[in-house]
Image (cartoon, rainbow, N blue to C red):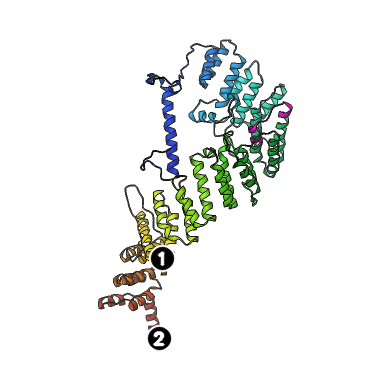
Amino acid sequence: MFQDDPFLMPRNAANARLYSLSKESGKNAAKYIIENFPQYFDKTFAEPNVPCLMPKSLTPQTEGVSEEALRERIHLRMVKESVDMFDQLLQAGTPVSLETTNSLLDLLCFYGDGEPTPEKEQEEKEEEPEVNASEQKAPKRQFQRGSQSSGPRWRENNHAERIFKIMPERNAHSYCTMIRGMEKHGAYSKAYDMYIDLLNERHKADVHTFNALIRAVPYLKERFTERWELAKEFLTHMAQQKVQPTLLTFNSVLKSLRRCGGVGRTMSLLVLKEMEALDIEPSLASYDHLLSLFYKGVDAQSSDIISEVLNEVEKRSFTAQDPDDANFFTTAMQVCCDLKDIKLAYQLNKALENGDNWKFLDVDRLNGYWSKFFSLLCMMEQIEVVLKWYKEMSSSLFYPSPKNILDLLQALDAANQLEVIPSVWEDVKQLGFSRRQDLLAELLSLMSRDQHPSETQLAFAKCAEEIKAAHEPAGLGQVPLEWTGSALGHVVVLFSRAGRTQDAWNMMEHFQKINRIPTDKVMDEFLNCAKQTNCPDEAIKMVRLAASLGLLSSQRLKSRTEEEFELSETQKKALESIKCDGDSSDSDSDSSDSDRE
């Protein structure tokens, strides 16, 4: 997908998504230029000529007002021009055939009275195959109360309704077109009323119209049982009208059952048995709806359903038959994470690698799938296995998110392998997360918590130095991160354990600048470092800092400095001149004793 150039390679999931969208946007821009300005692409240099690669003519060739000109404009998907031409024909008293009028209704109901856009054309490509525009499948819709498709709403008395009302003759195609258009654009009640009119006129609906009505069920009834009864009523009508259900019919039923609570879970198994009886193989969308019914929003601990589903899925290589097919693998991986079942996740991963199943994951879904899988690995697997997968997956199969890095750090902590943190920090920088406060806090906390071998401590100190740089002014327009007391303390500890006394003292001075108090552990670590590097001046500075902050530990630190360092006379005088809280309290008690005497 991306250019084989390190500079152009995306660093994280956000960049990968931006780059893929930019690439698609560039294609759409080129397509727009070719289609809207074909006069600039009239030179044919290819020998032999490849017509399918040449720009299509989008300019009507038929002039005047006639039914043939109307059909041409409908074919070119010119919505406004088609409606204007139709009105002109009516005004001239020229009758328009039923077939042409139905084609115009197809166009209006699909685009919702709006002009075609690249998004709508892409949506059309994802619709049901081998049907005309009046039988196009409705787009995917989020399952929220009152949720509707992201396209334009069905306006009152729009051109489609107006033309339908003035049609001298209507057939089943006319009614089916209107029903599917209304359902597609969110007018569910109107679609149901139109279906009743269709029955009253003794017409029969086709299978695609029934699919649309079944998808509209959750928006027509409030109670779960009423929704199921209405869906069952539509299925009964199909049997009465001898309309053979398809895979998409049963998928529409399962999709509606997702909004039927416990009733949906009970009836979904009966739907699958009916599919089996009709020798209709479920698609990935069927299994996706089933998993959503039994696991989403339900505290289910049983893995029986998903086990049976995965046993079936891993036997087959699927082809796309439903737009919802693409959701299966991410839904199934989320279920594996919720159940904390790593064996099921491995089984799902095996099914993904079977045949062309991997093609169902686009850039966003691919990253989400592997991100969930990696989080589950960090939670359930041995650290050696986790690191093996991390090395193979990172930046090739997916881009780790901040949560993935936190999960990896927790796994390293649980396995007591914190020496790997410096390499993880390099990945954090590469992924562009070096300014994430939550990640920096976790990294510093783990590195500074325990004492490690000197080689590891030196590597930790190098990481701390780079983290410190993120808190300092850099280039123009880059705001430095704000120090927290805990982050400062961790950096001081890491510098101290690496023997970098001056760097540690520079960080100690920051406590006063940001009005924070260092902990006793931080000051003891600094004092130990000063002792190891024989830097009594820094130790005296630290005692003076503790005294200026009014810390109770200042007297203890002063005593340690006197006992553990070889001080010159000048240094002794400087140390004695520091007034600690302990000194003042002792002098106060001495003066009170003398007063009593």
Q: How many marks?
A: 2
Disc 2 or 1, which lies upstream in sequence?
1
Q: Nearer the viewer, mark 2 or mark 1?
A: 1
Q: Could you tell whether 31 is left or right of 104 in the image?
A: left
Q: Secondary structure at mark 2?
A: helix
Q: Give the SS element for disc 1.
A: loop
Nearest the viewer among 444 and 509 is: 444
Q: Amino acid at mark 2?
A: Asp
Dominant secondary structure, magenta = helix
Q: Quadrant of the N terminus?
A: top left
Residue 241 on the magenta segment: yes
> Residue 284 location in percent, x, y?
60, 38
Q: Amino acid at mark 1?
A: His
Task: Please give the residue where the numbered disc 1 appears in the rendered image.
Answer: 452
Is residue 434 visible in the rendered image? The answer is no
Does 403 sit above or below residue 141?
A: below
Residue located at (40% from left, 82% from top): 589
Q: Which residue is mark 2?
A: 593
What is the crowding at mark 1: few (fewer than 14 residues within 10 Å), some, or many (at least 20)? some
Q: Which residues are magenta?
A: 237-253
Residue positioned most to the bottom: 597
Residue 69 is situated, as x and y percent measured from the top left of the image, at: 52, 14
Give coordinates of residue 429: x percent, y percent.
Answer: 39, 51
